[in-house]
Amino acid sequence: MILTKGKTGTRDVVEVVRLARSMRGDIRHVKRLGEEQLMAYSNEIGSPYELLLEVRKLGRLPVVKFAAGGIATPADAALMMKLGEEGVFVGSGNFKSGNPAKRAEAIVKATTHYNNPAILAEVS
């Protein structure tokens, strides 16, 4: 697993969004490279060439990618899913809310239906 981590306890999703976008950009970059360019890039970043070949083939990392830190609302969670995260961890953002059980249920719905604007509007 790979954790994209923002600032825990801040309820500020900006840092984790920045990191997720950066990782997405790096994956897109790998997908565009030819064989020789990929080998050079592998040496440049110190990553195994075979791993980069797999990333290029899959169009994603070959491990589960999830986000944490600063995610406090259903909209935050849905945004992270849209950015390619495969899961989110919500800690203090949920437990500091007025109704943690209701907030947790809304976040689960938002991550499940992150491509459905009607459900996102309802749970937000």
Image (cartoon, grey):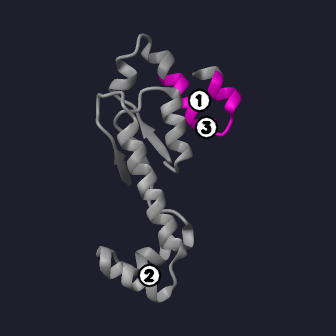
Question: What's the distance in space between the residues labelled 1 and 2, CA to CA?
Answer: 39 Å
Task: Return the residue at label 1.
Answer: 109
**Label 1: element kind:** helix
Which amino acid, mark 3? Tyr
Give above or below for 120 relative to 58.
above
Question: What's the distance in space between the residues labelled 3 and 2, CA to CA?
Answer: 33 Å
Disc 3 or 2, which lies upstream in sequence? Answer: 2
- Which numbered dot is residue 38? 2
- Which numbered dot is residue 114? 3
Closer to us: 46 or 91: 46
Give the magenta-colored segment's residue range.
104-121
Mark closer to the observer (1, 2): 2
Give above or below for 47 relative to 73.
below
Closer to us: 100 or 46: 46
| Farthest bottom residue in view | 36
**Would residue 42 be found to the left or right of residue 88 on screen?**
left
Asked whether residue 16 is in view, the answer is yes
Give above or below for 65 relative to 115.
below
Query: In the picture, which quadrant includes the N terminus?
Result: bottom left
Quick one: label 3, few (<14), some, or many (20+) residues within 10 Å?
many
Q: Is 118 contained in the magenta span?
A: yes
